[in-house]
Amino acid sequence: MIKTKTKLAQIVIIVLLALIMMTGGVVFLCNEIATPPTQMEESGEDNRVYADNHKAEIHLSVYGGKKASVNVSGFYQVGNYSGNSMKGGPWSFSFGPNDSKRPSVTQNPVSYVAHYAGWIKVESASVVADGYVLNESTYASLHGLNNGNWNGRDYMTISALNGKWKVSDGVTKNGTRYFYINIFHTVRINLHHNDGTETKSTMKISTAPDSWSGNAPTDCSWVKPAAAFIPSRNGYSFKGYSTSATGTNLRTDSAGNWKSTKEIVASLSDYYAQWEANTIKLTLNKNGGSGGTDYVWYKYNTNKFYSDSACTNQITSITRPTRAGYTFKGYQGDGTCGGNPNESYIAYGSTEFASDLCSDIYKNATLNAVWEANTIELTLNKNGGSGGTDNVWYKYNTNKFYSDSACTNQITSITRPTRAGYTFKGYQGDGTCGGTPNENYIAYGSTEFASDLCSDIYKNATLNAVWEANTIKLTLNKNGGSGGTDYVWYKYNTNKFYSDSACTNQITSITRPTRTGYTFKGYQGDGTCGGNPNENYIAYDSTEFAADLCYDIYQNATLNAVWAANNYTVTWNGNGASLDAKLWSYAGSTGYTSSNSGSNSSYTYSGKNASSSVTYDVAISYKTPIPFKLGNTFNGWWTSASGGYMVANTNGQVVASVSGYT
């Protein structure tokens, strides 16, 4: 029975709609005729309302010289139409612009009255129409109607009915509900994206009269556009739509909500998106560097840059960061926020801000500092040494070393310098250009380049050769003498002397050697190990160690003892005999000859009966004067007039030392 009545209601509505379209009345457009829902008594909870005093008031709004025809059907029809009241159903009625009556319908009970794709669907909570859920708060302002004059203009073409419940006293079965029906207007409008292209969207919106005030309504209210119609634009924020391309009178907010609930609109109206340039924040990642500017702000596509987020303090440059061992090459983006990956945008070369920065990067981004490793030149100060490599180059932090400034000829070692008296211990820096002071960086031990050299020393620097004084051993050759010190050691150029090779027992003198008939004159070198040939270095006169010994002789050496033959004055006492009036001086293999030179070694006496004196060198074979005494034979020279021992034989040949005798 219920299903039969439902089918009958469908047929009645279809016929009425056809009649309305033929008579020029207000047209209700629909895409299809849907089958109304069947009563739900067969499944689940019974949603019908059975209270005796329930009523539904149907308020109709129509204007513009058109007549409205409304079909209302229900699954239970009781009562009859009478005056301003309608009982029973289904109902079909129409009224025109001069009809001041507000027909109302009371139906008892109301179960389902539906409009869905051509039907009115009434539910206890809401009415769904054209894809929009019309809830209590959305159209609260549309409920007030009065009995004024219905004159007005033709503002719209009616396309559909929409309605809602207004619950006055709860949702129980005994509640009273009022149902309002308003006639909606559907138009299409053009939404221009207004972003420099011809892109636009066409969307369908619905409007409804706000209220009646005697004349036809002069305003219509918008339904919120779908979010899909809110455009996006790199670097900009959508502010809303305006009716002109450069308009400031926004008709919607940034979320697409129409600012006014009373917006007059015509079909295919043009609305233009309005944009506001975003404030872009650039975070400058130093990427291992330090110092300099941290952030830059700008309004997108304005080519003005600021040091503050409010964009009040304009700047034309940044403070560039620094990084030991590197040259700053600028800031680059990675392309994730716009722009080209690995393109320099800030502070590269003499350029502070690239001309396309403000248009390329359209949202907050991090730019990364780009660094180029410096070419470091190390000057190798020989520090008293000579020879070897003069310079080394490397790219900072690359651990590759070169013999040329272009860094094309890679090397793995240097030629080490030399220095007399020293052992080379490597090259050290002083810390002023990076690195640890007094740390060996080059050519120490078996290591050529320290592993941390290329990262420690970050700018051109001078490394100084480190030298360790050698321990010098002097062998003292007695050279015919005996006794005394055999060896002396010292640290080169330290002027401290030792009796042991470990240089722990310091001495200030040596024990001198001795040699019969000679006077020790000191130790001399031959110049082959440094120093001057035939220069006395040790134990000469009152000097033990020459001041220049420790730096003249720079390697192990043998010093030779120097001896001076002792000179003696011999008085040849003729012991009663007469001597030739001559002083005999040695003249090589010929013995002694007389001379008149007047020197200490040869001069002429004037007397004969005295004794004469002469200086002799006992290291050389020579003959003494031969005295003459009449009646006697010369028996040699003796150390005493009677006794003693012979020092020269009858031929005048010296046979014994005459030291200490006259």
Image (tube, rainbow, N blue to C red):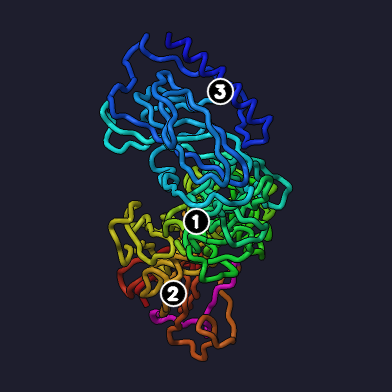
The image shows residue 510 at horizontal and vertical percentages of: 33, 63
Within the magenta stretch, is there residue 173? no
How far apart, in angstroms, are the residues tagged by discs 3 and 2? 164 Å
Vertical order, 622 against 59 (above or below): below
Q: Quadrant of the C terminus?
A: bottom left
In primary-sequence order, the first of circles 3 and 2 is 3
How far apart, in angstroms, are the residues tagged by discs 2 and 1? 85 Å
Identify the residue at horizontal 37%, vertical 36% (top origin). 178
> Mark 2: which amino acid?
Asn
Check disc 3 and report its element: helix, strand or loop. helix
Q: Residues within 10 Å of mark 2 (few under 14, many from 20)?
A: some
Indicate which label's residue lies in the foreground, 3 or 1.
3
Q: What residue is disc 3 on?
A: 13
Residue 567 is labelled as: 2
The image shows residue 122 at horizontal and vertical percentages of: 43, 28
**Is residue 510 at all visible to an observer of this figure?**
yes
Q: Residues within 10 Å of mark 3 (few under 14, many from 20)?
A: many
Identify the residue at horizontal 40%, vertical 82% (top origin). 576
**Left or right placement of residue 492 versus residue 368 in this view:** left
Check disc 2 and report its element: helix, strand or loop. strand
Q: What residue is disc 1 on?
A: 289
> Mark 1: which amino acid?
Gly
Q: Which residues are magenta?
A: 573-589
